[in-house]
Image: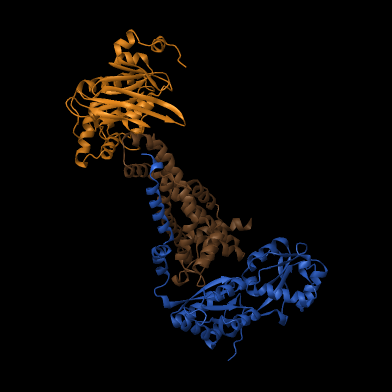
Chain colours: A blue, B orange, C brown
């Protein structure tokens, strides 16, 4: 029995193996039963692309069950950076987009990926830093001035650097302060390229400043010696918008259910749910949907 | 499985040859071996004894030449797939019981399931391993493993056994039991062709000798004639204990 | 260090069942990785058998490619599968992105080269040992394959367990194609990543210990099987 004399049998077996390998369909069918445990019918869930900071604030765990109880529709949140969330929504992998970058959101609608954008709520950013306050930010309410002071003193500052809404806001403040932080990248200004949590982890470890949304900060357990140094500037307010993905672009979008959510979140019921989400008695988000 | 040959049938080798990598391993061999006889292949290492055995068995296809079964009063016919049993120098044990090793060998050779166990037990009794039937084969001693290897081939009732230095790694006690089995079986009609470089063993067992050197059959004939007066100088030197290069 | 100290009571608390989400997460991790390993093995074992048994043009190239694929970063596999399953991609209409099915597929692809390489080695070694004997029996190809598979079944199981270990420990692939959706596609590894990024290191560590315990248990099984396999071989 010399294997070398039977190339035809070998080719046949390889062909069979390759056919099996490319049959992704059957594989998916085999894996289907797993999904069934999570939901019963296709129509009872929608996918919403949102940001990690929003999910980590705990807002969704508080608010979404009320929507599900009322409509029976489960909202599955895929939490990503703002850039990735928009990318996922524009590919049609989500039915809804719920982020906090108005400029990017309006472009999303203008490019035809989404139906109308609606204001939902705002939260605010704060600047955190070492309790010893080396940049002397105590009492400074103007965020642009505060960042200018940090730049001038070359105090360590950590940026997310990940195209998120938080990052976009941060860059706007630097620009208004007339500072180009990239020029000092690697020195006092460092970009982590990651989410709010990891960035705060590193800031705590390095005893550095950072710009963070209040929600993530309130939930963050690893503060080290950091505390809130600058807050309250109107420019620190962070506006959230909800957009239904355009079915003209992606016909499979669950329009009715997605629209039901968008309508609910701006309704008095949804807005109230947002308003009564608190951490340690403090509200994180301030509903401001237009009637 | 019915034995397909009746004595005095023989194996006719006709210009059987094999080479590899441009080197001739076995030069064309033409001779006739009685199936129920006791033939020993003698020669130094590298003489081609193993290769010749594998060519006779068919597990190694020859470059040219053929092997046939010759019976008086009938035409030569090709050797049946399972007419010759082969015993390797180092027995390969399957990771299962002694009994299952034998039934596996029978299954591979197409014996019906219903018959396998009884035939296996019968042949195991014949080699003295009946008591160890349920022991895991890999745990047997060297001699027991070789006896199991012989049981595996005998279970299929072959016409002749081919053995490649079967006692080379066994102690004298185990060697004695193997030789006893071979003698008994050949008396009962299943002969053997066996290679060895143990001259004493050849003297004990052989009725025919094939003497090989560098891939060539130098001498072939009755054992007592070879031992008493070898026909060639090189045969004489081998018997005298010289190293043949 | 505070985090480490907080971990042990937290592990006890987690295991006590007071955190209801935990067992769902553990269960999903095990189900996804087990199913992925099975799916991969259905392809890997025949492929390994073909490579071990037959000689064909390109065999060495195939072996080299498979060995190289063992080093595929999980996150790259995740990205590729995401692009495949995205609505904008070729398999979009299947609609399985962000579901456990997608996670199974991604992990199966990740684990396939590993299981193939291990199984191939096991089969080749067995073939080298059994080949001469089975040739001496003039065994048909079918008998050769069946005998080798029967003799190596315990060792092949350790190859599967190695694949399962790789799948259970990875986070890059399941994060991207699953989306880490709470209650739907959150596994132990994505939960650990999430808690770490939230700064809740004690909880992340606790989950990590539970995951380690699972992986250790799997490896202990593999070791026991290996010992048994060698015992029967003498």
Query: Where does residue B165 sit, x and y in percent of width and height?
Result: 36, 23
Q: Nearer the viewer, residue A265 or C104?
A: C104
Q: Residue furthest top?
A: B228
* Viewer-side residue, A98 vs A14: A14
Find residue B1 and report its image quarter: top left
Give the left or right position of residue A20, taking residue A200 as reference: left
Q: Is residue A108 visible?
A: yes
- How many numbered marks have been drawn onto this rendered protein structure? 0
Q: Residue at x 36, y 14 (%)?
A: B199
- Residue A213 appears anywhere in the view: no
Residue A130 at what x, y percent from top left?
Answer: 74, 66
Q: Where is residue A177? Give x, y as percent.
A: 79, 76
Q: Quadrant of the C terminus of chain C?
A: top left
Tell me where residue A29 sits by quadrant: bottom left
Residue B21's place in the image compared with A176, above or below, is: above
**Left-right relation of A152 to B134:** right
Q: Could you tell me which quadrant the N terminus of chain C lies in?
A: bottom right
Q: Position of residue B158 (x, y in %)?
A: 24, 30
Q: Residue furthest left?
A: B73
Whether residue B58 sits left or right of residue A160 in the image: it is: left
- Please state which of residues A62 and C82 is positioned toward the viewer in this rendering: C82
Residue positioned most to the bottom: A291
- On screen, residue B190 above or below A178: above
């Amino acid at each position: 029995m010399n294997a070398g004399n039977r190339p035809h049998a070998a080719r046949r077996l390889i062909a069979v193996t390759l056919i099996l390998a490319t049959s992704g369909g059957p594989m998916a069918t085999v894996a289907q039963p797993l999904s069934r445990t999570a939901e019963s019918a296709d129509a009872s869930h929608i996918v919403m692309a949102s940001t990690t900071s929003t999910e980590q604030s705990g807002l969704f765990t508080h608010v979404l069950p009320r929507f599900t109880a009322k409509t029976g529709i489960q909202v599955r949140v895929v939490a990503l950076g703002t850039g990735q969330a928009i990318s996922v929504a524009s590919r049609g992998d989500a039915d809804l987009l719920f982020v906090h970058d108005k400029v990017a959101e309006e472009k999303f609608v203008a490019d035809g990926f989404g139906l109308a954008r609606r204001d939902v709520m705002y939260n605010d950013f704060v600047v955190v830093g070492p309790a010893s306050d080396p940049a002397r930010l105590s009492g400074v309410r103007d965020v642009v001035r505060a960042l200018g002071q940090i730049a001038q003193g070359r105090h360590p500052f950590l940026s997310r650097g990940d195209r998120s809404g938080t990052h976009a806001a941060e860059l706007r403040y630097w620009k208004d302060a007339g500072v180009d932080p990239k020029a000092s990248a690697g020195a006092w200004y460092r970009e982590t390229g990651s989410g709010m949590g990891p960035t705060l982890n590193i800031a705590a470890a390095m005893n550095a400043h950072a710009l963070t949304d209040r929600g993530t900060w309130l939930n963050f357990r690893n503060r080290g010696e950091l505390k809130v140094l600058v807050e309250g500037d109107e420019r620190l307010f962070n506006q959230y918008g909800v957009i239904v993905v355009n079915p003209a672009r992606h016909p499979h979008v669950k329009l009715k259910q997605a629209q039901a959510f968008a309508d609910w979140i701006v309704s008095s019921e949804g807005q109230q749910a947002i308003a009564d989400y608190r951490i340690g008695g403090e509200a994180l988000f301030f509903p401001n949907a237009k009637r | 499985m019915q034995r397909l040959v009746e004595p005095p049938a023989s194996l006719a080798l006709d210009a059987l040859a094999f080479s590899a990598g441009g080197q001739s391993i076995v030069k064309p061999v033409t001779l006739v071996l009685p199936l129920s006889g006791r033939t020993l292949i003698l020669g130094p290492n590298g003489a081609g004894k193993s290769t010749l055995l594998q060519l006779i068995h068919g597990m190694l296809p020859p470059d040219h030449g053929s092997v046939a079964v010759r019976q008086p009063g009938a035409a030569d016919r090709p050797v049946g797939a399972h007419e010759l049993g082969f015993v390797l120098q180092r027995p390969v044990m399957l990771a299962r019981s002694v009994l299952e090793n034998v039934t596996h060998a029978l299954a591979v050779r197409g014996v019906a399931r219903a018959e396998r166990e009884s035939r296996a037990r019968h042949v195991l009794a014949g080699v003295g391993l009946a008591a160890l039937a349920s022991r895991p084969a890999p745990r047997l001693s060297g001699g027991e493993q070789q006896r199991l290897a012989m049981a595996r081939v005998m279970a299929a009732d072959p016409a002749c056994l081919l053995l490649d230095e079967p006692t080379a790694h066994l102690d004298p006690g185990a060697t004695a039991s193997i030789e006893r089995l071979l003698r008994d079986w050949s008396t009962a009609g299943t002969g053997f062709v066996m290679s060895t470089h143990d001259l004493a063993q050849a003297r004990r067992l052989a009725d025919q000798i094939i003497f090989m050197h560098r891939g060539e059959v130098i001498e072939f004939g009755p054992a007592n004639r070879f031992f008493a007066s070898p026909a060639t100088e090189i045969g004489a030197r081998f018997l005298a204990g010289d190293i043949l290069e | 260090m505070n985090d480490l100290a907080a971990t042990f009571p937290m592990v006890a608390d987690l295991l006590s069942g007071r955190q209801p989400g935990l067992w769902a997460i553990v269960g999903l991790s095990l189900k996804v990785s087990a199913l992925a390993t099975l799916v991969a093995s259905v392809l890997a074992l025949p492929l390994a058998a073909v490579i071990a048994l037959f000689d064909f043009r390109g065999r060495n190239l195939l072996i080299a490619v498979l060995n190289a694929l063992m080093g595929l970063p999980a996150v790259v596999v995740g990205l590729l599968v995401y692009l495949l399953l995205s609505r904008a991609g070729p398999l979009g209409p299947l609609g399985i992105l962000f579901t456990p099915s997608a996670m199974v597929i991604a992990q199966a692809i990740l684990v396939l080269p590993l299981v193939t390489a291990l199984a191939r080695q096991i089969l080749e070694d067995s073939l080298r040992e059994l080949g001469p004997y089975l040739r001496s029996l003039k065994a048909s190809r079918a008998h050769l394959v069946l005998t080798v598979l029967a003799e190596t079944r315990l060792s092949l199981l350790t190859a599967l367990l190695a694949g399962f270990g790789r799948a259970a420990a990875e986070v890059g692939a399941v994060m991207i194609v699953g989306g880490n959706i709470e209650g739907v596609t959150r596994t132990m590894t994505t939960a650990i990543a999430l808690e770490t990024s939230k700064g809740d290191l004690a909880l992340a560590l606790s989950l990590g210990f539970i995951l380690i315990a699972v992986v250790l248990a799997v490896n202990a099984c593999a070791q026991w099987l290996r010992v048994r396999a060698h015992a029967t071989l003498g």
